Image (cartoon, rainbow, N blue to C red):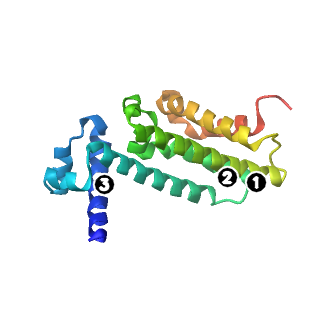
């Protein structure tokens, strides 16, 4: 019985994910989720107490998928420089593809939900830990010269958050993302001071 309940919950989450992606949290209704899953609304309430609880399950699933993809992407290369490059590329190009998670991270309307703040804090911490691990590896092998991997990780992850929106919205950067990405890597890794 427990296995069946998990399967039904997973099915509801999978279907709801598509609906939330299409309409957003605000415009999605429990009736739409029930209809799309071919269940009565009362059946949906048997598995989830509210639309917020379903959205939380959707966002948590996307967060887990994102984390697995990030780890896989970073671990493709041995060099700390390549790992950092892969992280930056992933952060700029893939975070937006998990739309419900992205909305949870950025939509102020959703901030009133306690679990959203919890998910944001958890993602920020995990992201900093990934970057810090890359920086520490580079410090050990002499690739990076930093006083503190922790401060470096905070700076890089904060910079990536700050660049996200301007780069996504900018028409100028849509045509030549490769050049923009190379310039970003150059500034991050080598700074702006002429040597």
Q: Position of residue 80 (x, y in %)?
A: 73, 52
| Quarter of the N terminus within the rendering | bottom left
> Where, by quadrant of the figure, is residue 74 drawn?
bottom right
Q: Which residue is mark 3?
A: 13
Q: CA distance from mark 1 to mark 2?
A: 10 Å
Q: In this rendering, would 62 be left or right of 148?
A: left
Q: Earlier in the sequence, mark 1 or mark 2?
A: 2
- Can see residue 2? yes
Q: Position of residue 153 (x, y in %)?
A: 68, 41
Instruction: Please report contact status of discs 3 and 2: CB closer than 8 Å, yes or no.
Output: no
Instruction: Please report contact status of discs 1 and 2: CB closer than 8 Å, yes or no.
Output: yes
Q: Nearer the viewer, residue 54 or 71?
A: 54
Other residues around mark 1 within 10 Å, as few (<14) / some (14–19) / many (≥20): some
Q: Is residue 43 above or below residue 191?
A: below
Query: Which marked residue is nearer to the observer: mark 1 or mark 3?
Result: 3
Other residues around mark 3 within 10 Å, as few (<14) / some (14–19) / many (≥20): many
Q: Label 1's element?
A: helix
Q: Which residue is mark 1?
A: 137
Residue shown at the point (30%, 38%) measured from the top left: 25
Say the numbered circle drawn on residue 83: 2
Instruction: Please report contact status of discs 1 and 3: CB closer than 8 Å, yes or no.
Output: no
Q: Label 3's element?
A: helix
Q: Label 2's element?
A: helix
């Amino acid at each position: 019985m427990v296995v069946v309940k998990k399967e039904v919950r997973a099915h509801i989450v999978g279907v709801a994910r598509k609906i939330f992606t299409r309409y957003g949290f605000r415009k999605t209704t429990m009736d739409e989720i029930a209809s799309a899953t071919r269940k009565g609304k009362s059946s949906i309430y048997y598995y989830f107490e509210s639309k917020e609880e379903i959205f939380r399950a959707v966002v948590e699933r996307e967060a887990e998928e994102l984390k697995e993809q990030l780890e896989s992407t970073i671990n493709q290369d041995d060099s700390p420089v390549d790992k950092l490059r892969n992280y930056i590329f992933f952060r700029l190009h893939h975070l937006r593809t998990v739309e419900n998670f992205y909305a949870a991270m950025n939509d102020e309307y959703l901030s009133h939900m306690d679990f959203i703040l919890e998910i944001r804090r958890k993602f920020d911490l995990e992201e900093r830990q990934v970057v810090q691990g890359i920086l520490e590896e580079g410090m050990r092998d002499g690739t990076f010269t930093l006083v503190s991997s922790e401060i470096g990780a905070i700076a890089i992850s904060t910079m990536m958050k700050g660049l996200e929106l301007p780069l996504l919205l900018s028409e100028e950067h849509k045509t030549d993302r490769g050049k923009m990405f190379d310039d970003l890597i150059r500034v991050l890794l080598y700074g702006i001071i002429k040597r």
